[in-house]
């Protein structure tokens, strides 16, 4: 199951709006295909993804802890395999 959030363009403004909290994020191409599912402190992670040009789009969900983010990401990664 995909994260139940709308896609946003991966650009500076989007990264600036990202929370400085743990969470899970999906990186996608221009057509909305999920390329990867990652976790971490969202703003920091998205800054890196933007700098490396890893994707065109992003969507995320916050969690309370990094451990919760890791577990949720692992659950979601199963659908990519």
Image (cartoon, rainbow, N blue to C red):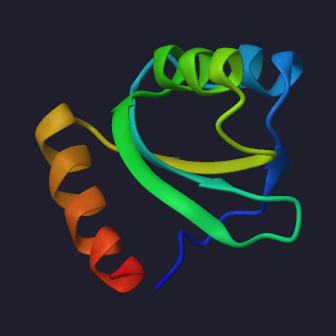
Q: Is residue 57 left or right of residue 35?
A: right
Among the 4 quarters of the image, the one containing residue 15: top right
List x then y, in percent, for residue 62: 44, 43
- Residue in view at x 26 percent, y 37 percent: 64
- Residue in view at x 46 percent, y 85 percent: 1
List x then y, in percent, for residue 60: 56, 49
- Residue in view at x 69 percent, y 47 percent: 58
Q: Is residue 31 left or right of residue 24?
A: right
List x then y, in percent, for residue 77: 32, 69
Which sits in the foreground, 45 or 54? 54
- Residue in view at x 87 percent, y 71 percent: 31
Q: How many marks?
A: 0
Name above or below for residue 79 compared with residue 73.
below
Among the 4 quarters of the image, the one containing residue 12: top right
List x then y, in percent, for residue 75: 24, 72
| The C terminus - image quarter | bottom left
Q: In this view, does 40 lie to the left or right of 47?
A: left
Name above or below for residue 20 compared with residue 63.
above
Name above or below for residue 7 compared with residue 22.
below
Q: In this view, does 63 lie to the left or right of 5?
A: left
């Amino acid at each position: 199951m995909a994260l139940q959030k709308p896609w946003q363009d991966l650009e500076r403004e989007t990264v600036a709006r990202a929370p400085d909290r743990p969470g899970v994020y999906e990186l996608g191409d221009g057509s909305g295909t999920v390329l990867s599912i990652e976790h971490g402190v969202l703003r920091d992670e998205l800054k890196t993804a933007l700098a490396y040009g890893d994707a065109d789009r992003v969507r995320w969900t916050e969690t309370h802890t990094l451990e919760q983010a890791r577990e949720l990401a692992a659950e979601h990664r199963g659908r990519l395999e």
